[in-house]
Amino acid sequence: MLGVGAPGAAGWATIRADFTAFFGVAALCMMIGAWRRNGDLLLVPGLLFGVALAGRALDLALAGAYPGWAQPMVVEALHVIVLAAAWRILPHHRVGDLAG
């Protein structure tokens, strides 16, 4: 079986909640950031996809390849690249100014 699976109701509830949170927050930040022409909001989904990509790369190094491993990594890498480019193009604050 490819993909994510979880035994029991608690496992499925966790999957539904985590996937909805991850992709919902990413999509909402991308839509609002684009709508308002605010590059700052694109940092959130960029970091989400970047951390996901790093986690997949770590798993690839530790556990090895599996069928279909490249496709999600390519999609996540493209998201990071497009979001970083959009952040640079759209009006934004310096990252140091956001944290201070």
Image (cartoon, rainbow, N blue to C red):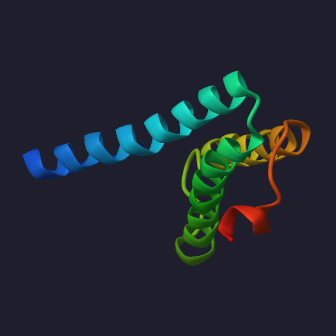
Q: Is residue 66 left or right of residue 76?
A: left
**Please, is residue 80 above or below residue 36 in the view?**
below
Q: Quadrant of the N terminus?
A: top left
Frontmost residue, 86 versus 82: 86
Q: Residue at x 60, y 61 (%)?
A: 51
Could you tell me residue 14's position as x and y percent?
23, 50
| Residue toward you, 67 or 61 | 61
Direction left: furthest residue: 9
Quarter of the figure with residue 22: top left
Which residue is more in the foreground, 26 or 74?
A: 26
Q: Left or right: 66 with respect to 88?
A: left
Judge left or right: residue 6 versus residue 85. Answer: left
x, y percentage for residue 87?
Answer: 81, 43
Look at 63% across and 65% down and name the residue there: 54
Q: Position of residue 46 (x, y in %)?
A: 67, 50
Residue visible at 68% across and 71% down in the picture: 100
Does residue 52 show up?
yes
